[in-house]
Image (cartoon, rainbow, N blue to C red):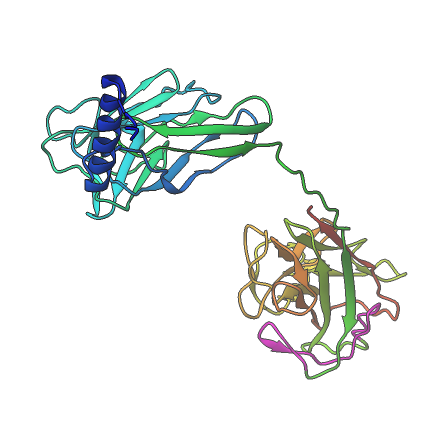
Amino acid sequence: MFVLSRNVSASYRVIATLVAAAVVMWAMGAYHYAQAANVTDLYDLLTDSDRSAFSNHTIQFITPTGITNGQTVTIDLTGFTNASGVDFTDIDVATTTPTSDLTVATDCTGAARIGASFAGLVLTLNFCAGDGGFVAANGTTTIQIGTNATFGVAGDARLTNPANTGSYEIDIAGTMTDRGYTRVAILDNVLVTANVLTTFDFTVYGNGSGEVVNGTTTTQVSSSTTIPFGTLTAGDIETLSQDLTVGTNAINGFVVTVEEDQHLLSSTGADIDNFANGNNSVTPAAWSAPTNNITLENTWGHWGMTTEDTDTTRTAEFGSNQWLGVSTTPQVIFSHNGPSDEITPGTGSTTVGYQIQISPLQEAGDDYSTTLTYIATPTF
């Protein structure tokens, strides 16, 4: 009979024992390896992504493990600059689960719940121990850096973007368990251009008799190029009107003036003077008849004008049934301070009136005439 000997050395027995023990302890959960989780929903929202621009930052993330009292969060903003002196007054921290706006200071003294400080371009947020400034698992933390930080002390400084275009990494770390990073893109602004052609249309229309113009009624028919008062009778008032329209996209609107080239003059040398009694009034006043003084020729007849645009650039505006003299000096009768549509009264359209009255002393003549000139000026 043969006997086979199986001798196992002491060293092999030790190894076998250790392996077996390790398997048992692993099965029982005796070994636990702590491992950081990635923060989720992480972003940094800039208010301006242009090169070298001042910008506010809104950084938000969710920490699967949470943040406990005494832990820190670091935000590495390398690439940006702190030329304007961003400090704790320009930083807000808000959390959810629990929901809270956390008071920020330079350190964890006083009522501060967050200590905030920069070391170069690395911002460290210290969640102060023992004050309840924590974030539960899967809670959201929002950090505002810049003038958008308004909780407590309003922020007055912003970080400056990198001078070069490109993608810049922002790392989130610290003594909290979770980690993460995101990126922001710095790029040149896009210039958008367009041209809009200027427009300006000015039109004069004639009116019939029986039309209302600034509180009175017309007695004769006009055209776009004539104001025919006709044959005048002493004491009678003759009134005509014209409609004016302006259409323009001028940003500062327009002004319309009117002027005569001379008094209403006859070939005999006689004239019909300007309202009132030849005084050529520039302040609108109620209509009055010529005073018919035998020794004062300019009181024998006069004519004047009015407008329904009572909000012009004039220093003295027209009231209802108020008139002034038609002058060789341009008088403002229509204006607006913005674009106009040729329709809206006082903005794109108005009515002007012309009125005449003579006394028995007015010299005879069958060819009294003058020329009116409208000047419409846009203001771009």
Taking the view exactly as shown, the residue that stands out farthest to the top is: 120
Nearer-the-camera pick, 322 or 22: 22
- Residue 259: within the magenta? no
Observer able to see residue 255: yes
Image location of residue 209, percent across then percent down: 73, 82
Residue 62 lies, with reference to residue 343, above or below; the image says: above
Residue 55 lies, with reference to residue 377, above or below; the image says: above
Q: Is residue 86 left or right of residue 71?
A: right
Q: Is residue 130 left or right of residue 286?
A: left
Image location of residue 252, percent across then percent down: 63, 49
Q: Quadrant of residue 167?
A: top right
Image location of residue 157, percent across then percent down: 37, 26
The span shown in magenta is 211-229
Taking the view exactly as shown, the residue that stands out farthest to the bottom is: 210
Identify the residue at horizontal 81%, vertical 77% (top origin): 231
Observer able to see residue 67: no
- Residue 228: within the magenta? yes
Nearer-the-camera pick, 128 or 29: 29
Nearer-the-camera pick, 290 or 194: 194
Identify the residue at horizontal 75%, vertical 47% (top origin): 195
Image location of residue 5, percent across then percent down: 28, 25
Q: Quadrant of residue 358?
A: bottom right
